[in-house]
Image (spheres, rainbow, N blue to C red):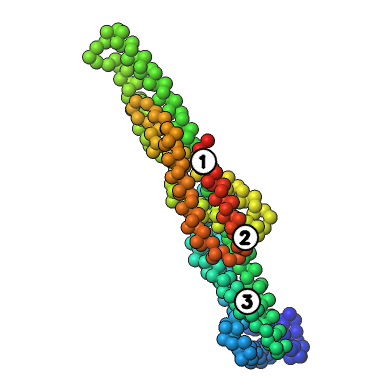
Amino acid sequence: MIKSLSPEELSQLPVEKLPDHIPLDLIDSLPAGTASLLDDLIFQHQSLVVSSRTDLGDFLGTRAIKAYDLSMRSAESTPAYELQRSLELLRRKNSERASPIVLSQVMDQLETMERLGGNVCDVRDDFLRIIDARKVLRSKRPQDPTVGRMVEEADKNLARQGETNCLLLSRYYAERCGLGVLIMQAYHKSYQHHVSAHRDLSDRLASLRLELDSAVSTDRSAGVLGHESIYVSKLREEIRSIFKKLRSLEVPLDETQLTKWLDIVFDFSLYRRSKPHYEQILETAENNLTGLMQSYFNTRDRREGGEAIDHDHFNAVSPEKIDDYFMKSEAFVRGYFHQKQLEMSTHACIPASDRLYAFKRLQSRLLGSMKPA
């Protein structure tokens, strides 16, 4: 608007109507006469702000001044601006990559998102400061109408800043969770391949053992004593080879990875109501997470419980062992949620009742998925 005004029109503009922050590049782009006039108006405006701020301090005290200053800061000086700028840079960089995006690129993107964790904490902390500042301003009842209008405008500014923070946090957690879903799906596919390979090798092993028993029996019937036939030796060699392959088939999951995915899904679950389509993203994420946790704990329990392959047989897991390993799985989940409960207050953007609902909902679902069939 300022650019469109003539020097005469600009000189008639009420000083108090000027914005609190006018970019320097805007001033530099104006004709010399207009720029000089605008400089004078800015000086008058700043003098008015200083005077008003002093009046506010006289009426309401030091804490109110700090709250007022917080409300008057420029967007560029807020933690939200830094996080938003980083997200935009990341989105622009990702859009320049060739399609389709491969898993390694998705993992790189998620790693970059995780490095923004410090910025995210700054935005959450800033929201807490905004809440405190609004409480200070709302606790005041100035008799002077001018001071009252200043307090009201400052409160509105803080409300807008808080809304910006919350929307930005929900966007961060949604984009982070979306990347996590892609990676979890890839891990689930890898795990299914692992299970399929394990099953095929186990079936082949069982078949070879039957062949070996039959061949050994045939040798005995034929009176072959003191040494094995070439056929029996080959069977034993192939069996030993399969044992080695089975032992090398480790599940591509560990508790550190599960905890990372839990963080991603849990944090986003708190913000799922920010936009309608977030519920669908969360459901997909929860389905993938519960599937991977079932896969991990079931495989770990079988391995620790004695179903690992030995040279003689597959040992069945007793009901007592199943209960024991379910308790270990349950302890892992409950331990995780106990820790997260201590951190929930930092997500002040979300009403306490919504936080508690999201907490109980996800915990209940994960514990239910751990129960043995």
The residue carrying pointer 3 sits among few (fewer than 14), some (14 to 19) or many (20 or more) residues within 10 Å by Cα, namely many
Under mark 3, the amino acid is Arg
Q: Position of residue 85 (x, y in %)?
A: 57, 67
Tag 3's secondary structure? helix
Q: Position of residue 6 (x, y in %)?
A: 75, 87
The answer to whether residue 239 is visible is yes
- Closer to us: 200 or 106: 200
Question: Is 130 rendered above or below residue 216?
Answer: below
Q: Nearer the viewer, mark 1 or mark 3?
A: 1
Give the Cα separation between the discs numbered 3 and 2: 21 Å
Q: Which residue appears at 63% of the width and 56% of the height?
A: 272
Q: Position of residue 66 (x, y in %)?
A: 57, 82
Question: Is 353 rendered above or below residue 283?
Answer: below
Q: Position of residue 266 (x, y in %)?
A: 55, 55
The answer to whether residue 31 is visible is no
Badge number at residue 371: 1
Question: Is 206 rendered above or below residue 343?
Answer: above
State the count of labels.
Answer: 3
Tag 2's secondary structure? helix
Quadrant position of residue 323: top left
Q: Are marks 2 and 1 in contact (CB under 8 Å)?
A: no
Residue assigned mark 3: 134
Q: Which residue appears at 67% of the width and 82% of the height?
A: 151
The residue carrying pointer 2 sits among few (fewer than 14), some (14 to 19) or many (20 or more) residues within 10 Å by Cα, namely few
Q: Are marks 1 and 3 in contact (CB under 8 Å)?
A: no
Under mark 1, the amino acid is Lys
Q: Which residue appears at 47% of the width and 46% of the height?
A: 330
Quadrant position of residue 216: top left
Q: Is residue 123 left or right of residue 274?
A: left
Residue assigned mark 2: 353
Q: Please report whichever mark, 3 or 2, sits nearer to the chain's N-terminal start.
A: 3
Under mark 2, the amino acid is Ser
